[in-house]
Image: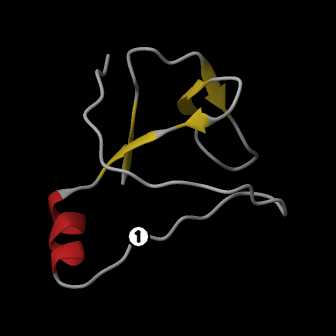
């Protein structure tokens, strides 16, 4: 999936060996936005699932949703 740059981006997440990841940070959460390719959409329609990998050893609760977001 391709990360999407939201219009209201206010933080860029980084980790060694990873690309920069634009995000929106609030006092309660950090949100990143992703757009699946047509191939990935076809894989999901064929029963494929989304894998979420968090870098590091700590894993906070997460939420996955489908939203419409203003992008740059």
- Which residue is located at x 83 percent, y 59 percent? 58
Residue 56 horizontal side relative to residue 41, left or right: right
- Which residue is located at x 64 percent, y 47 percent? 18
Q: Is residue 20 visible?
A: no
Residue 58 horizontal side relative to residue 14, left or right: right
| Quarter of the N terminus within the rendering | bottom left
Q: Quadrant of residue 27?
A: top right
Q: Residue at the bottom extreme? A: 47
The answer to which of 52 and 26 lies nearer the viewer is 26
Q: Residue at the right extreme? A: 57
As drawn, 53 above or below 1: below
Within-10-Å neighbours for mark 1: few <14, some 14–19, many 20+: few
| Quarter of the C terminus within the rendering | top left
- Which residue is located at x 24 percent, y 85 percent? 47
Q: Is residue 65 visible?
A: yes
Residue 70 in the image, given as x and y percentages of width and height: 28, 21
Q: Quadrant of residue 42?
A: bottom left
Residue 12 in the image, given as x and y percentages of width and height: 62, 26
As drawn, 71 above or below 63: above
Residue 52 in the image, given as x and y percentages of width and height: 54, 65
The answer to which of 6 and 68 lies nearer the viewer is 68
As drawn, 37 above or below 10: below
Q: In which quarter of the image is residue 54?
A: bottom right
Residue 55 in the image, given as x and y percentages of width and height: 72, 57
The answer to which of 25 and 72 lies nearer the viewer is 25
Residue 5 horizontal side relative to residue 54, left or right: left
The secondary element bearing badge 1 is classed as loop
Residue corresponding to mark 1: 50
Q: How is the image coloured?
A: secondary structure
């Amino acid at each position: 999936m391709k990360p999407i740059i939201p219009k209201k981006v206010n933080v860029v997440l980084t980790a060694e060996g990873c690309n920069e990841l634009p995000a929106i940070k609030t006092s309660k959460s950090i949100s990143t936005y992703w757009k699946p390719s047509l191939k990935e959409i076809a894989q999901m329609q064929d029963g494929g699932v989304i894998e979420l990998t968090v870098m590091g050893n700590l894993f906070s609760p997460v939420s996955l949703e489908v939203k419409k977001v203003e992008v740059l």
